[in-house]
Image (tube, rainbow, N blue to C red):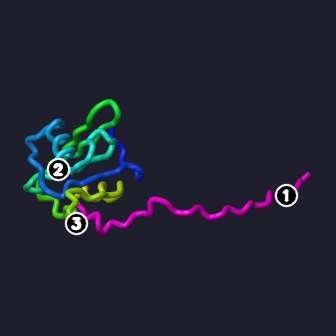
Amino acid sequence: MIQLTPHLRILVAVEPTDFRQGIDGLCRVCRQKLESDPMSGAVFVFRNRRARALKILVYDGQGFWLCQKRLSAGRFRFWPSREGKSLTRRLQAHELQVLLACGNPETAKGAPPWRPVEEVRAVPALAFRSSF
């Protein structure tokens, strides 16, 4: 089971990928095109040319997970665009969840990954009255 937590590094390949490839082929894409180590523990997300399916590749320390989601109808309308020369785009965990639900992660609002904790004031102990 892959749990999407805020500390995960999630990289989305912005260009479509040939989905005839399995784990070894996608690892090759990670190394050669995306210039990333597939065994780094990062989550890699790929989309096919027709935008009807996604594949997620992740290494958990013992082996690779390869997950696929294929839509029965429709397409993934939103896909992150290229920023500069990079072939990947980084997403946060809640943005990936929105993307997997066919939504637009750029419009999704989530809590910031870190926020300061407010100082907690001590509450004085209540005096108990004896009814005897």
Judging by the rendered image, the residue that carries numbered circle 1 is 127
Rendering quarter of residue 90: bottom left
Determine whether 25 is above or below 106 in the image.
above
- Is residue 87 toward the left or the right of residue 10 in the image? left
Judging by the rendered image, the residue that carries numbered circle 3 is 84
Compare marks 2 and 3 and give the one earlier in the sequence.
Answer: 2
Tell which tag, 2 or 1, sits nearer the viewer. Answer: 2
Range of the magenta residues? 103-132
Please say if the residues under marks 3 and 1 sit with CB atoms less than 8 Å apart: no
**Mark 1 residue element:** loop
**Mark 2 residue element:** loop
- Is residue 114 toward the left or the right of residue 29 in the image? right
Judging by the rendered image, the residue that carries numbered circle 2 is 33
Question: Per the image, is 115 magenta?
Answer: yes
- Is residue 76 toward the left or the right of residue 118 in the image? left
Determine whether 34 is above or below 84 in the image.
above
Of residues 124 and 58, which is closer to you in this image? 58
> Residue 65: x and y, percent?
26, 37
Compare marks 2 and 1 and give the one earlier in the sequence.
Answer: 2
Mark 3: give few (<14), some (14-19) or many (20+) Cα within 10 Å.
few
Residue located 33% across and 38% down the image:
1
Which three-letter amino acid code belongs to the residue tagged 3?
A: Gly
Outermost bottom residue: 107
Which three-letter amino acid code belongs to the residue tagged 1?
A: Ala
Outermost right residue: 132
